[in-house]
Amino acid sequence: MENQGFMDKLLDGVGVEWLPLGEVGKFIRGNGLQKKDLMESGFPAIHYGQIFTRYGLSAYKTFTFVSNEFSKKLRIAYKNDLLIATTSENDKDVLKPLAWLGEEMAISSDMMLFRHDQNVKYLAYCFNTVTFQKQKYKYITGTKVRRVSSKSLAKMIVPIPYPDNPKKSLEIQREIVRILDTFTGLTAELTAELTARKQQYNYYRDQLLSFKESQVEWKKLGEVGSVCMCKRILKHQTLNNGDIPFYKIGTFGKNANAFITNELFTEYKKKYNYPKIGEVLISASGTIGRTVIFDGKDAYFQDSNIVWIENNESIVLNKYLFYFYKIAKWHIAEGGTIKRLYNDNLKKTKIPIPYPNDSKKSLKEQKRIVAILDKFDVLTQSITDGLPHEIELCQQQYEYYREMLLSFPKEEVIA
């Protein structure tokens, strides 16, 4: 419990006051900058929408710029300003903060800068706490476009340790930032590692599924199996709640929002096509080529939109097909409102079969490729193992310590 003792010492006796932001600093709204004004070089500038997609908690440089002449007409942020996106179509992103650590930089409208004498990253962390997020929902207005006014923002409170002793206050703020930076830094490292591993996975997958002409035969999927789908389920046969989940194209690979009765499922499963465990289901409309390996759990799937190849595993393994589907060049029908992969086009899609004249050697090579890609898949995709799991655990740790440190508990910490 060494870390617990450290937390006790850090927080013990801290005199904290929850102050309205209007008493902590002042808000200055951005002006005049639109997306069309952005350039690849010039005077640093940020459009408010970029805060959602291109920046994390803090930044010291921008990805976009405006002309030096135009920058003279714009609101300028300086080092230690807190940038706040005050408008979004998503409640979660309203009041998303960005601690600015760089030099002069122009900001757009629908963004405010908050000028203050606190540690800017400390304030950014405060904005992300559950306590602060609960506050903001009292002040969000608008229907499609959601926003918070500067007047409302000024009423929202944040914890300032020793507000009457700025030196001591900043020392505590810096130490809290240092602790939280450790967690966010580790998460960033793991995320970068995951990105690198995914790139490596894609490279090796492409290499493993590339063969010399003498070692491979390109067969049409229609030659290795038949295209199958479940029996059509009509709308009046579905339920909001029920025994058997019914997956439509919009919920494929997610959580079902429709169900059918067990009686209908048993009847249709017995009479009509139904996938076997291990066979690979494919989305044939919308986002073409999404795949799910059927695990055998009772479920039903929308006809024509979700299909599978009932293949002969003495020729090609299900798992080999699964990995090939990720790089397959589908013959998609264009022109309609929704893209479709029709059965005839699916049958024409070609797959490389290694050592086609030696089935034993072919299956051995397929198994070797699958084993290698399985290891990469666990490392880069698994939410119970591998890097995604580590990132999730690290994020949970960060959120736990952020809430504990920025609520300044005592009894709760000891407990």
Image: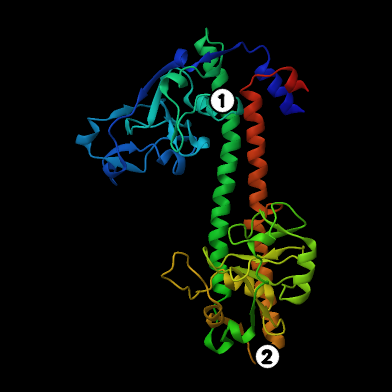
Q: Quadrant of residue 273?
A: bottom right
Q: Position of residue 353 (x, y in %)?
A: 61, 83
Q: Which residue is the extreme one toward the left?
A: 69
Q: Quadrant of residue 207?
A: bottom right
Looking at the image, residue 383 lies above or below residue 126? below
Can residue 247 be seen in this snapshot? no
Looking at the image, residue 311 lies above or below residue 335? below
Q: Position of residue 159 (x, y in %)?
A: 57, 17
Q: Nearer the viewer, residue 212 or 302?
A: 302
Of helix, strand and loop, which one carries label 1? Answer: helix
Q: Nearer the viewer, residue 139 or 169?
A: 139
Q: Quadrant of residue 293?
A: bottom right
Mark 1 or mark 2, which is nearer the start of the sequence? Answer: 1
Q: Quadrant of the N terminus?
A: top right
Q: Quadrant of the C terminus?
A: top right
Q: Position of residue 165 (x, y in %)?
A: 52, 8
Report the amino acid beneath label 2: Asp
Q: Which residue is the extreme one toward the bottom?
A: 357
Which dot, 2 or 1, sits closer to the camera? 1
Report, in whole angstroms, how far the alpha carbon at label 2 lies from the one at label 1: 65 Å
As drawn, the label of residue 132 is: 1
Q: Along the horizontal axis of the image, is 393 left or right of 132?
A: right
Q: Residue at x 74, y 21 (%)?
A: 412
Crowdedness near tag 2: few (<14), some (14–19) or many (≥20) residues, C-alpha within 10 Å = few
Looking at the image, residue 413 lies above or below residue 243? above
Report the amino acid beneath label 1: Phe
Residue picked out by circle 2 = 358
